[in-house]
Amino acid sequence: MPQKYIVVLGLLLSGLGKGAVTSSIIKMLDFYDVKALPVKFDGYLNYDCGTMNPYRHGEVFVLDDKSEVDMDFGLYERFLNKNLTGDLSITGGKLFSKLINKERSGGFLGEDVQIIPHLTNEIIDNIESVYKKKSPDVLVIEVGGTVGDIENSYFIESMRQFATTHDVTFVCLTYVPALDVVGEQKTKPTQIGLRQLLQAGISPNVVICRSSAPLEKKARDKIALFSNLGAERVIDDSDDYTIYHLPQHFIEQGLDKVLLKDLRFDNKLNKQKLNEWATITKKIKEPKESVRIGIVGKYTGLKDSYASLREALIHSGAFNNARVNIEWIESTSLEDKNYPSRLKNLNGIIVPGGFGKRGTEGMINAIRYAREEKVPFLGLCLGMQMMTVEYARNVCGMKNANSSEMDPKTKYKVIDIIEWQKGIKKKGGTMRLGAYECILAKDTKSNTAYSSGRISERHRHRYEFNNKYRKAMEDAGLVIAGINRKDNLVEFIEWKESFGIGTQAHPELKSRLENPAPLFTAFIKAAHARSADK
């Protein structure tokens, strides 16, 4: 079978949801039993996004194989319900590094190395290599940024070249604004964006229109005219109750038939797959119950910093037939004596991951409140570390106990840097990353949540529970619920008296709509029980 590709491009501005569109296309093809895989290109010159500030780039998503990749990989995995690998992530940094290394080793035999053809050929070789290695029916390539950006111009040029020798369908995502003062949807920005795309030598096969309200016929017809397409190839992507409904929304407009025709597949719709997906998304739209969860973090100014956490709560909410109402709480706002007033109406509290000292005292206050008031609590990575610090200070009597990351001079370093991390100088890709096994103790809440004594979760950290204080904290009542035996690292801790679980892992990274993270489903169940008791 010849290789088949879909290339997803963006017009006008970033943040429109190319990741959601790419994921929905892949899921839609899956409903037809067409095996599709994503590839993501990001134009930044970082090798990967592991050293990026979450306020700049959003969440760093971590794969089982230790790769630190763009947050769109979280979307791909959540839609596909499948683990992906780091070779599906292409960055400007990786491309230029490979090109320079090849030049330094004499790989170009004295040629003057140029963007065209050497870099564009490198991109094409990379994509062909991924296809041959993975053997999908279709490879769906998402190009980060927008048409006209300098950062991705060479990649778009390589896709133009690629389409001359390969079977490629181009899908572009645009934005159709509706100004209140005018009262109608305006297509002029899209017309200009399409002109840029055509000037780059690419004619789209499908145009998907992001908008706040359903796409009007007048706007659809005008966009079709300027993109040389029939109106059936201009697709609405207006605001919906959940991104997980998008594959169904596309099918309702016939996008499935358009793409199958372009790709020359005659597969029949697997109605069982579609109905199972529709049943879950309906629970998101029409839940029977609701719970209020407070997320006490240090990056709440950009919600995408906690994208996987937010989605894990949606998944576990649907599993429990409950709408999860999230209250985002900046942890620095809890550092005064009035912090209980911000927390009293919550059914559950989560302290997620992060780096650095800022806001950690507010996290500790939130954790103390949850423990003393028996509010269901979940601590993730840094949240588990601050859970340890709070217990050491307020239960074990270790005054000013802390993590050595926050206070290198503290007497009680109950959280300390992992021993093999001490000699590391380079920052990129050097943390404890990826999937690690954990053995859960019997008769613990964690074991009950997973229904298993042996699990694997993903990690991203340098600091860990200090075993020097393990016995003292266990004697004071802290439950050591999970251990990585290979490195003798504490992975899960619990409170005896109430639902309070801390994990050094990031279980939110493996949560999927069809397979929610067990720890989150147990947490939402406990939070709902508390809301019912009130």
Image: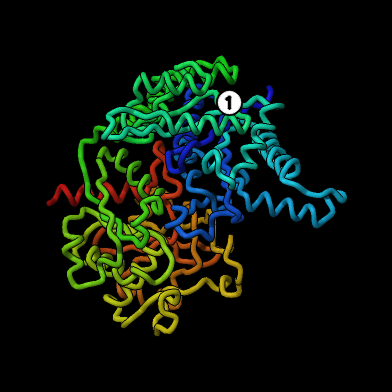
Give the residue displayed 42% in from the left and 45% down from the top: 511
Q: Residue 384: which quarter of the image?
A: bottom left
Whether residue 454 is visible, yes or no, is: no
Residue 210 place in picture, x, y as percent: 40, 32
Q: Residue furthest right?
A: 109
- Judging from the image, the colouring scheme is rainbow
Q: Count numbered badges in the picture.
A: 1
Give the residue displayed 46% in from the left and 69% down from the top: 464
Give the residue displayed 87% in from the left and 49% down from the top: 109
Circle 1 residues within 10 Å: few <14, some 14–19, many ≥20: some
Give the residue displayed 20% in from the left and 48% down from the top: 529
Amino acid type at image mark 1:
Ser
Q: Secondary structure at mark 1?
A: loop
Residue 213 place in picture, x, y as percent: 31, 30
Residue in the foreground of this view, choosing between 418 and 22: 22
Which residue position holds label 1? 203
Q: State left or right for residue 529 relative to residue 23.
A: left
Residue 452 place in picture, x, y as percent: 42, 49
Q: State left or right for residue 29 relative to residue 134.
A: left
| Vertical comparison of 151 with 125: above or below | below
Residue in the foreground of this view, choosing between 82 and 103: 103
Q: State left or right for residue 158 relative to residue 230.
A: right
Residue 168 place in picture, x, y as percent: 62, 26
Whether residue 292 is visible, yes or no, is: yes
The quarter of the image holding the N terminus is: top right
